[in-house]
Structure formats: C-alpha cells, structure tokens
Image (spheres, rainbow, N blue to C red):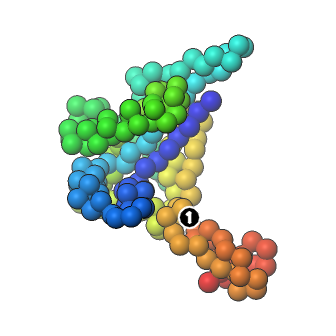
Amino acid sequence: MRLVWWLPLEYWRVSLNRGASPRLSELEQIETALRPYTVVAAFDGQIGAMGTVRWSSLDKLGESIRLVDAAGASTPPLARSAVDPAAVEVIDSLRPVFATLLGELGENLHFFFFPGRDAKGAALLRPLEEGQLTVAIGTDSYVYRLPLGALLPPKACPVDGERWSGAYRYCPRHGKPLE
C-alpha cells in the first residue's frame, strides 16, 4: 500500500483560501518557508496475511524516494539539516493533523523536501504549465502530468456544455476544443 502526494505552493493557496475569509498572513508565511523546495509526502506499507501493515520508516522510505527529471536524472530528498527550520516547522505542524484525520495512515505519512529552484532561483516545477513530475520509490514511478487540473478552473464542451478538467484541451466525447 503506497501513497505519493506532491504539495506544490499552489496547493496551499487553494486550500487556505477556501472558507469564509482567506488567511493571507498564514499563506504568506507558508509560501515564504516552502518556496525553495518541492515537498512530497508518502507512505509505504506491506499488508500482511492478517491485514496488519508493516510500514516503512522515514529513514527507509527516504533512502528509496527520488524525484526524476525529464532526462532521467534522479534527485534524493534533502537532509532535514539542510532544510530551513521554518519549512520544517510548517510541515511538522501538519503531522498531528494527518495522524488525527487518517489514524495509522497519517501516523506513517512522511514528508520529504527536494530542491524546488534552480541555481538562478527559477522554479523547477510549474504545476500550471505543461510538463511532468515523476516521483520514484524503489523501482516504481509515479507520474504527475502537468498542468494539474485540480488547480485550474474547469472548461466546458461547446457541444453539450459538460464541464471537464481545466487540464483538458479537447472534449473527450466530441473532440472539440474546450472553452
């Protein structure tokens, strides 16, 4: 049983701006702390014969998780000691929330920091633009095709008005460009 969850900065904007009033100061603090990084959460567990789960530890999962670029170059997660303490604090504040919400799954959800910027300070990943992110755990790969539709407004079919993911260009039923 495995989960790989990429948390781009745009995720924080969407999730924190839902509700009655946006929490702009909290959003700004999170964005400032996490901007230099690509954050990926994951858990990995082997289900036993009796339904019990043997979970991978943070260290064990950290040894096998990698970001893979389009050229196939693999990047391991940064050591926690190399990550700004403010970024670690943001992520560590989430751990009890996930443990409460998800129980054993949340207790075994581990967060990893990868470089998020190139040498010139430009974002390595742009979730609203064409591209992809690949996260590898051992020999398995998990691919995020970009743009992330969940962060885009939906588009409508010009034929029947059905709404589709904002990442789609064409209606899957009619083949017409979405509006």
Residue 144 in the image: x percent, y percent?
A: 55, 53
Image quarter in which the C terminus is found: bottom right
Residue projecting furthest to the bottom? 158
Question: Which residue appears at 49% of the width and 64% of the height?
Answer: 151
Viewer-nearest residue: 33 or 21: 21
Q: Residue type at mark 1: give it.
A: Gly
Residue 47, placed above or below residue 165? above
Give the total of numbered labels. Answer: 1
Tell me: 78 left or right of 136.
left
Residue 119 in the image: x percent, y percent?
A: 25, 55
Tell me: 135 left or right of 126.
right
Disc 1 secondary structure class? helix
Q: Residues within 10 Å of mark 1 (few under 14, many from 20)?
A: some
Question: Which residue appears at 34% of the width and 64% of the height?
Answer: 21
Tell me: 81 left or right of 51.
left
Quadrant of res 86 = top left
Question: Which residue appears at 66% of the width and 71% of the height?
Answer: 164
Residue 153, placed above or below residue 38? below
Residue 63 visible at all = no
Image quarter in which the N terminus is found: top right
Residue 16 visible at all = yes
Residue 60 in the image: x percent, y percent?
A: 45, 22
Residue 11, placed above or below residue 164? above
Viewer-nearest residue: 171 or 29: 29
Q: Which residue is mark 1?
A: 149
Residue 171 in the image: x percent, y percent?
A: 72, 76
Residue projecting furthest to the left? 85
Question: Which residue appears at 68% of the width and 18% of the height?
Answer: 51
Residue projecting furthest to the right? 173
Tell me: 36 left or right of 108.
left
